[in-house]
Image (tube, grey):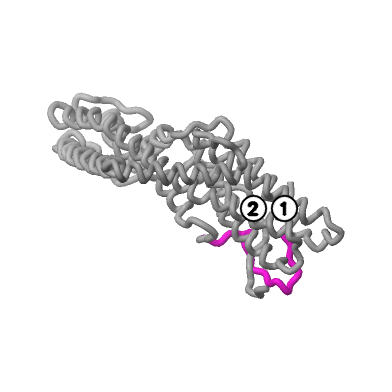
Amino acid sequence: MSSDPDPVSRPADTMRERVGETRVKIWFLISANRWLVTGVILATTYVLLLVLHAFGPSTPWKLVSTNGIASLFGSMVIAVVTSVTLVLSISQFVLAGEIGPLGEQRERMRNETEFREEVEDAAGIGVSPVEPARFLQTLIETAETRARSLNNAVTSGPESAQFDEIAAFTEGLIDHSQIINDDLAGADFGSFDTLLPVLNYNYSWKIFTARTLRDKYDESLSDDAAAAFDDLIESLRFFGPAREHFKTLYVQWEIINISRGVLYGAMPALAVAGYMMLEFDAAKITGSVFGISTAYLTVSALYVLTLSPFAVLLAYLLRVLTVMKRTLAIGPFILRETEQLEAVRYEESSEVEPKQR
């Protein structure tokens, strides 16, 4: 039996709580509708321009006496065309991964079919669901069922008191599985409602802790309890490849959405930039609003409008990159420190504390 320090304290149920980030940050990065985030980015840019105009050193007459507007929007034309070309190149790269000879397509089909059959054997069902959310629910329900079996095996005997740590672990796993199952209910693929619960399901910690406890109590476990431990670990291991598969599909889905969003915004942005270069005359716009010249308000608003393709790109990439960062490791590896993850030694008195409700 090993004496190396191993973390066995139960972490929080959500990704946000485990990494100690605020609700607002998580909402902005991954949870919020991307079009809403695009609007927030554009609105923030516009407000920043107004604040700089109001409090920074400025020369309002330059707006009507120089060709600065034409130069500004001329550079935006180049930037928009370049960004569209870049996004289209990325889209072609994604599409290239989906195009291949018959042999490669058959191999992909074979791998997915074999994986589904293994899950069906483990879950004891005839045909696994085809919907991604429901398939993930099946994996979680299988782990939950096996956790109940393990809990029964270690709590039904006369020496159950010595297995309180295992019982606490299985009870926590069952509670968390039920929460994730509820979150996945009715989720449609393509929306982030499918992927967010998957991020919250910390299967890496569950595998690691199950293996740690299995090794720690190896000499004391009955044959039924040992077999139940092995079955639970096996079911948890299915979750990693499944999550990575659906994450890959989701990223491809989002890249398509990015491409469409940038293309939707590119033509209006180019039209506005072209008008500002060819005909716009700021001298014909007079007056002010709250001390800010109407000409500046108008030019700033049209400039922000030309930024819409970049705002769409930024909004979607914030989510994609955050998801990729949170799911870099596959298997029982935890890449970041969490408040709940502490090292303890077997010879010390340690418990898997159930989460307080």
In the rendered image, which residue does mark 2 sit on? 232
Part of the protein shown in magenta = 336-352
What secondary structure is marked by label 1? helix
For the residues bearing labels 2 and 1, Cβ distance under 8 angstroms: yes
In the rendered image, which residue does mark 1 sit on? 150
Label 1 amino acid?
Answer: Leu
Which of the 4 image quadrants contains residue 37? top left
Question: If you read the primary sequence from the N terminus, does the residue marked by circle 2 or circle 1 appear first?
Answer: 1
Label 1 crowd (10 A; few <14 / some 14-19 / many >=20): many
Query: Residue 277: x, y in percent?
Result: 15, 32
Using the image as rendered, state which of residue 257 and residue 177 is in the foreground.
177
Query: Residue 116: x, y in percent?
Result: 50, 42
- Label ID, residue 193: none
Type of secondary structure dominating the magenta stretch: loop
Horizontal side of residue 86 vs 145, given as left or right: left
**Can you say whether 85 is above or below 187 in the image?**
below
Label 2 crowd (10 A; few <14 / some 14-19 / many >=20): many
Which of the 4 image quadrants contains residue 264? top left
**Can you say whether 254 is above or below 326 in the image?**
above
One can see residue 30 in this view: yes
The furthest residue to the right: 158
Q: Magenta stretch containing residue 182, yes or no?
A: no
Q: For the N terminus, which image quadrant? A: bottom right
